[in-house]
Amino acid sequence: MAADKYDQRPVCIYGLIDPRSMQLRYIGQTRYPERRVKQHMSIDPWENEKKADWIQELKTSDLLPLLVILERVSPAFAFIREKHWITHAIDCGCPLTNVRSVKSYWRKSLTAA
């Protein structure tokens, strides 16, 4: 069944951890975390060069990122909670690979709220 705006199954806010350093490197949201990790392993440098470089380093070492479920939430709150976790990780100094595309936008939207 395809996900749509009426699908009320919980959404997982998840993190990907570098198994070499145990640092949190990526935060996202999905209903299917294991499937999403596999998608991340299909490198698309046009999507996010920092993440692609990190994933390639892992693949070169025959490693996979570790998946951690940070929170399960209602779909209505998924973007808000993802934003919370990314902001928290940035504030804690985590070297997120998805920061390039969201940090300034989310910082502005948080201060405007």
Image (cartoon, grey):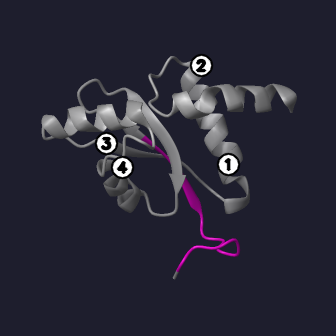
Which residue in the structure is indicated by mark 1?
Answer: 79
Name the residue: 36% across, 49% down.
40
Magenta segment's dominant SS is loop
Q: How many angstroms separate mark 2 from mark 1 (CA)?
A: 18 Å
The percent position of residue 102, horizontal first and vertical second, equals 61, 33
| Amino acid at pointer 3 | Leu
Instruction: Tell which tag, 2 or 4, sits nearer the viewer.
Output: 4
Quadrant of the rendered structure where residue 4 is?
Answer: bottom right
Quadrant of the rendered structure where residue 38 is?
Answer: bottom left
Helix, strand, or loop for circle 4? helix
Answer with left or right where residue 26 lies relative to residue 38.
right
- Furthest toward the front, the residue is 46
The residues colored magenta run: 2-15
Q: Nearer the viewer, residue 59 or 47?
A: 47
Neighbourhood count class around disc 2 (C-alpha, 10 Å): few under 14, some 14–19, many 20 upward: few
Q: Earlier in the sequence, mark 1 or mark 3?
A: 3
Disc sitting over residue 40 in the figure: 4
Which residue in the structure is indicated by mark 2?
Answer: 91
Which residue in the structure is indicated by mark 3?
Answer: 66
- Magenta span includes 10: yes
Callout 2 touching callout 1 (CB < 8 Å): no
Instruction: Tell which tag, 1 or 3, sits nearer the viewer.
Output: 1
The percent position of residue 42, horizontal first and vertical second, equals 30, 52
Q: Earlier in the sequence, mark 2 or mark 1?
A: 1
